[in-house]
Image (cartoon, grey):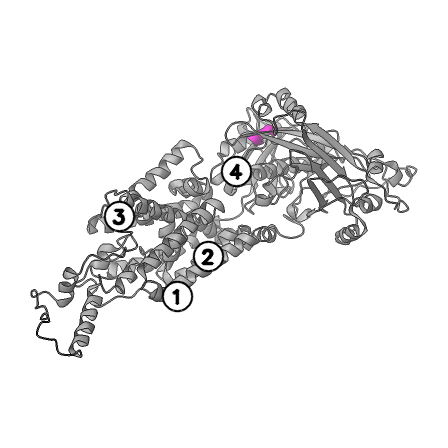
Amino acid sequence: MRFRNLTAWVLPLVLLAACWLAAPAAMALTLAEALDKTPPATLFEGADAYGPPEGDPAIVPVLRGGEKLGYAYLNSDFTASTGYSGKPIRIVVGIDPQGVIRGINLVEHHEPIVLIGIPEPKVLAALNGLIGADLGRVAAGEAKPPQAEIVSGATVTVLVMGDSVVRSAVKLIRSGRLGGVDAGTAPAEVQRALDPAVTATEDWQTLLGDGSVRSMVMSVGEVSKAFEDAGQPLAAGRPETANPEDDFITLYLAPVSVPAIGRSLLGDVAYERMAAKLQPGQAAVLVAGDGAYSFKGSGYVRGGIFDRIELLQDGQGQRFHDRDHTRIAALAAPGAPRLKEIALFLVPQDFAFDVTRPFDLQLLVQRATTGRDKATLPFDLAYQIPERYLLPAPEPAPAAATTPAPAQVGQPVEDDEGPALWKTMWQMNQVNIAILGVALAVLTAIFFFQDVLVKHPRTFLWLRRGYLAFTLVWLGWLVNTQLSVVNVLTFANALLSGFSWEYFLSAPLVFILWCAVAAGLLFWGRGPFCGWLCPFGALQELSNTVARKLRFPQITLPWGLHERMWPVKYMIFLGLFGLSLYSLSDAEVYAEVEPFKTAIILKFMREWGFVLFALACLLPGLFIERFYCRYLCPLGAALAIPGRMRMFEWLKRWPECGSPCQRCANDCPVQAIHPEGQINVNECIYCMNCQVLYHDDTRCPHMITLKARREKIARSGAPTLGAGAPAPAKSAGKAPPAFQAQRAARPASIPDSKGA
């Protein structure tokens, strides 16, 4: 006992000391550290060394036998590269003096979709599609920015990676630091201005006829042929509809920040409302569509980015976030058709966009190929504002001999403008947040009123089973809120490397659940999560219940073996924690020892090796209830450590518990009760089976004794028995009355929490 108590306090101190010792090393990744992870030959064929860094932000020459082949730089030094996780994605890029990308190496990311199921080599293969792209022409405005191939299930992540590589390279080229290409800025054009006198509104046909609204119409057959021509026969063979003549999409584009166009399409009231949101010089565009294909898709709901459309101008692209978007119910122009999707987008101010100059809207068309894989093709809708909206072109001014200002290129930009991503995610999840809030309130009520509920064993049993079913189906399979030891490691790493609430707030359901778990640790230990809120734990318990109904044999391990298997999960957790101090990404890979991602997040839709491992973790649980929870779960171990600091003891015990009575210990589903009678809160899942027994006067010896005394007192106060009445039963032996009564009692008709 003393050893266990000592371990409970020493272990947290060891972890804190490890955090303190590791703190100096947990800094943001620098270019030098990134190059240590990137052999020169990864960026340029045959390269064997790096030269000294140049400038600020630094770029490093890449050498082959002393000859300079090009430069290496870190994308996050030049542009924003914040991914879905809220943390920067860091990529080392090799670029030659002419502005051609020669190599790419992904050195750091924390993208959850890649960590929980999308193979990283698949993402890298898509990113490597940018190798060979001539971004010198893009920087000069002679070509459109290239696109990384979309990876199904990781669209937002790949888009962010590709955009950061292209944007950073264009900025570097335009700074003139490469020496081999003088892109400067895009070709100079005469600056035009909108004519404020043009305010008359027009009908739909006029707007289409004069080019105020541009459109692109494609049939299903045309898109299938485009995939066929692009060498994607599988995608071509999976059309959206069976009839190739059906409308695939009719896409419309118009700049509604132009007053006459905006008032025509939105109406005066909606236009004034939009204009009030615009900052000086900011533009807004309207995108509308109809047909079998949606230009919005559903990716923006999960990731906050509209991944199917991109605004292009001067070799730069801008994807819209949900914070830029306003849904429009109908167009106000007379004669306008009823369209399935109408969206108003405010162009972010950090994107240099001039509505008076030509621009494009690129539509990414995605089709399934095999399994979860998709093929993607881009289609461009070009726009040039009609002359009638512009003032006459001014006469070109004579060139002035001025000294150009030093280029302000390469400074990191702010991650976000406008509302933070986490606020948007909370707004999008209002219904789910409400459901989770109600579920947590119900669980809190169950715990606070447990003494009342456990007196009704059958009702409590079905209440528990119903809650576990909700945890598994809704919390786990539907909204994917399965906590993981990765969350613990990420939190510890954030404390060491610069804590930011925004990263954790970007997943509202996970954040709320962690807050509830933290509060529960103070009151009840690890039990509320492990026993009630863990989807994988619920899957184990419910599958064991079915196994019992099917009469699978149940195994009770000898206490000595059972007690010695408890530390295994703590060893696994400490191993992962120690590895995370060296490399969080490596720890996240080895955290696959948890089958949660396979069984809950991906619903077994994964490579067969992961599926077999998840089934191997579940199989013993059919014979030994919650086998994985008891002996292997690193998350349970992580929660048990701070759970020792709980402030209250809610589970009641009688003096006879453990000596001589062993009923609760024998019936505990996870064997968390020691033979001496005390409950090990490190292992208790708070199923309350022992509390059901505590109040049961047909199974608990103490309660049986109390019941027998009450009946004896009641009989002593009753009228004298008649001559024909049977005499009271005599003592059956020398055993205590409680155990005599227990042996004499019929088997209880009310099942315990194990369903026996």
Q: Determine the secondary structure under disc 2.
A: helix
- Helix, strand or loop for disc 3: helix
Q: CA distance from mark 1 to mark 4?
A: 49 Å
Q: Mark 4 vs mark 2: which is more N-terminal?
A: 4
**Secondary element type, mark 4:** strand
Magenta stretch contains residue 117 = no
Estimate the spatial distance between the alpha carbons at disc 4 and disc 2, rounded to whole Å: 40 Å
Neighbour class for label 2 at 10 Å: few (<14), some, many (≥20)? some
Quadrant in the rendering for residue 8: bottom left
* Residue position marked by numbered label 3 in the rendering: 565
- Judge whether residue 531 can be spotted in this image: no
Task: Decide: is 537 above or below 4.
Answer: above
Q: Nearer the viewer, mark 1 or mark 4?
A: 1
Identify the main secondary structure in magenta: helix
Q: Quadrant of residue 701?
A: bottom left
Mark in the foreground, 4 or 2: 2
Three-letter residue code for mark 3? Met
Residue 390 placed where, x, y %? 88, 40
Q: Which residue is mark 2?
A: 439
**Mark toward the start of the polypeptide (2 vs 3):** 2
Which of labels 1 and 3 is toward the front?
1
Tell me the mark number nearer the camera, choosing from 3 and 4: 3
Q: Would residue 704 appear left or right of 512 to someone viewing this image?
A: left
Residue range (magenta): 126-130
Q: Which mark is residue 107?
A: 4
Question: x, y percentage for residue 112?
Answer: 50, 43
Residue 127 part of the magenta segment: yes
The amino acid pointed to by label 4 is Val
Q: Which mark is residue 448?
A: 1
